[in-house]
């Protein structure tokens, strides 16, 4: 597998998943008056499922299987926890919230890609 091509596809899937999340959350809030917390929870699941399918079939050229889906979920939640940790540490250290966002955007996708490559699709 070409690592550069795989990483590029992974980045595009990430952008698409982000758009799916935003559209689902917005639709549930605007059309169905769902609480923003619940709407974002549903949107996270929808975006994560789309991300799993696209990354499995396109980015990593693997077959969809229960074991790699379980690993994908583990990596996704680890990425969520890392995102929360980075933002919290920066805030508690007195850093501007934009620094936390910048660190999340710079670090989490790279770490997630490596985790999927080494763990999810090994």
Image (tube, rainbow, N blue to C red):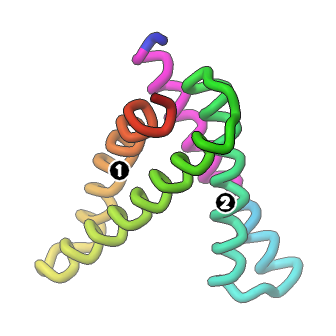
Q: Residues within 10 Å of mark 1 (few under 14, many from 20)?
A: some
Circle 2 SS class: helix
As drawn, is 104 to the left or to the right of 99? right
Asked whether disc 1 touches disc 2, contact meaning CB atoms under 8 Å apart, the reply is no
Circle 1 SS class: helix
Say if the magenta span includes residue 42: no
Q: Mark 2 points at which residue?
A: 21
Q: Which x, y percent locates residue 5?
A: 49, 16
Q: Residues within 10 Å of mark 2 (few under 14, many from 20)?
A: many
Q: Name the residue under label 1.
A: 108
Q: Residue 67's mark?
A: none
Q: Which x, y percent locates residue 106?
A: 30, 47
Q: Residue at x 35, y 71 (%)?
A: 84
Q: Which of marks 1 and 2 is nearer the N terminus?
A: 2
**What's the magenta region?**
3-21
Q: Residue at x 38, y 67 (%)?
A: 81
Say if the magenta span includes residue 7: yes
Q: Which x, y percent locates residue 93?
A: 11, 78
Assign the magenta stretch its main secondary structure.
helix
Instruction: Report which quarter residue 110 is drawn in.
Output: top left
Spot the residue most to the front: 67
Q: Residue at x 71, y 88 (%)?
A: 35
Label count reads 2
Nearer-the-camera pick, 118 or 57: 118
Which image quarter is the C terminus in?
Answer: top left
Work out how far the residue at label 1 is from the one at label 2, CA to CA, in angstroms: 17 Å
């Amino acid at each position: 597998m070409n690592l550069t091509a795989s990483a590029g596809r992974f980045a595009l899937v990430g952008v698409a998943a982000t758009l799916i999340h935003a559209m689902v959350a917005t639709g549930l809030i605007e059309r169905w008056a769902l609480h923003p917390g619940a709407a974002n929870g549903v949107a996270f699941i929808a975006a994560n499922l789309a991300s799993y399918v696209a990354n499995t079939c396109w980015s990593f050229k693997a077959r969809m299987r229960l074991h790699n889906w379980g690993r994908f979920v583990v990596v996704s939640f680890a990425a969520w926890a890392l995102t929360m940790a980075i933002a919290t540490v920066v805030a508690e250290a007195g850093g501007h919230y934009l620094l936390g966002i910048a660190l999340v955007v710079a670090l989490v996708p790279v770490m997630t890609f490596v985790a999927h490559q080494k763990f999810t699709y090994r």
